[in-house]
Amino acid sequence: MKLVRGILVVLLSLGVGTMCGRAMADGEAPAWANRSTPVKTSEIPKSDYPYLADWLDQHAKPPQEYVIDLFKQHDLVIFGEGHNIKEHKEFLIGLIPQLYHKAGVRCIAWEFSRQADNDLLEKLVTAPEYDRAAALGFARDQLSHAWDSKEHWDVIEAVWRLNKSLKPDETRMRLTGISPNVDWCEFFITAKTNPPESTEYRQIVLALAKKVDAIYAQPIEEEILAKGIKGLAYVGRAHDWTHYEFSNNGSVGGLNLDRPIMGSILYKKYGERVFQVCLGFGFYHPIEEVMALRGHQPVGFDLFASPFANILTPAGWDAPEVPLSRVARGYVYLGPSANLHTNTPIKGFVTEDMFKKYQRYYEIDFGHKFANAEEVDQYLAKHAFPSVR
């Protein structure tokens, strides 16, 4: 593979001079990679990409091995997932047995169920036999009653399968929800029917938006870090950041939208006991292009200690560009974005009873009129999770 890259270096460097080609052939880092200041993607010539690919050859590991090894140095690893990406859930599910047996992980904290329902979740993952109907009922009762992603709820069964395989005297893996105990239907109805300057909007929407990450952080601290055990937190992107928070990000109704991030809250208190990993989703284009040189081989690596660290990227939500290392300390690449898939919708997820109870919520939040549960179900299958590509 390196011989091929050597040929690529010669071809790519023809337009930028022989000095660049010789530096690359000798394995020297390009000037921008040695800088401590941020670098724009436009400043990186494609003739430097083989250097980045060679760096990965020397330092990256297979994704599962990379994650397992992180627990030698850290007690909590936070995964930042793409809610719409099927492979992110499948990666976690395939990793669960190794998390337990090789990394010593005893608790997985996730965003997708309420803290108040953890007793029900405990019963599901420790039952003598897996109760698929009860698990589906649990899923239907969570969050906004419209979370119809099969892969998210498959995590429950994966934890149950691990626990079922353990010896009677072995500690069971726990799966714990960290979502706040709020009425999400009321939240979204208020957000869609009240102006930002209204009292209702301020009291319900902005108040929760400012503190939701602190709510997420509390059970992770109590159930993992304070107990001195190994744990993994599985949350959506932007809750995972340990080295970045929103700041001066505009205002709504005169109230500043600055807020702490869950990962940052935990990192500030526990330092290197906490580590964050971004599950790749095709957004960071230099990484995608370099991975193409490596045949799109899946890898995991410490991005903060790599030549990618200072490359600028939008943080999201109209926030300014920041170095990649501030939003991705570790990085797991599972394949090109063209090969990633959206979640599998659960057919019949919305029942008639749910439709009768939540019809107003569905119509306000989705901005669409529905005649029955089947229409809501069909709408979710098409629109709940945007395409990866």
Image: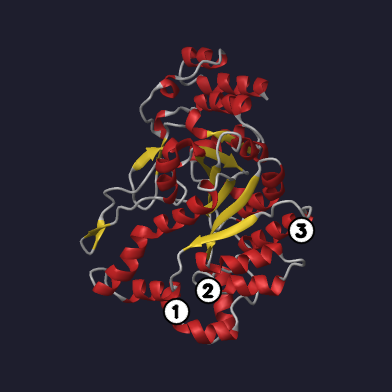
Q: In which quarter of the image is residue 252?
A: bottom left
Name the quadrant containing residue 211.
Answer: bottom left
Check the image and report above or below for 97 versus 119. above
From the image, tell me which residue sits under label 1: 361
Q: Give coordinates of residue 169: x percent, y percent.
A: 76, 52
Foreground pick, 168 / 237: 168
Q: Is residue 127 left or right of residue 56?
A: right
* Mark 3–mark 2 distance (CA, rounded to whole Å): 29 Å
Marks 3 and 2 close (CB-CB < 8 Å): no
Please state which amino acid type lies under the numbered disc 1.
Tyr
The quarter of the rendered structure image containing the N terminus is top right
Specify which label sits upstream in the sequence, 3 or 1. Answer: 3
Label 1 secondary element: helix
| Residue 177, position as x, y percentages in the image | 54, 61
For mark 2, what is the residue? 145
On screen, residue 226 above or below 144: above
Query: Which is nearer the N-term, disc 3 or disc 2?
Result: 2
Query: At 44% from the left edge and 46% from the top edge, which residue is drawn?
Result: 266
* Three-letter code, disc 2: His
**Who's the residue at 64% across and 39% down the image?**
68
Residue designated by label 3: 164
Kindly report the distance in space between the C-alpha atoms of the residues bearing marks 3 and 1.
38 Å
| Mark nearer the N terminus (1 vs 2) | 2
Q: Do the residues labelled 3 and 1 touch (CB within 8 Å)?
A: no
Local secondary structure at mark 3: helix
Residue shown at 44%/83% (left/top)? Answer: 360
**Gap in angstroms between the C-alphas marked 1 and 2:** 9 Å
Classify 10 Å Cα crowding around label 1: few (below 14), some (14-19), many (20 and above).
Answer: many
Question: Is residue 289 left or right of 190 when viewed as pictured?
Answer: right
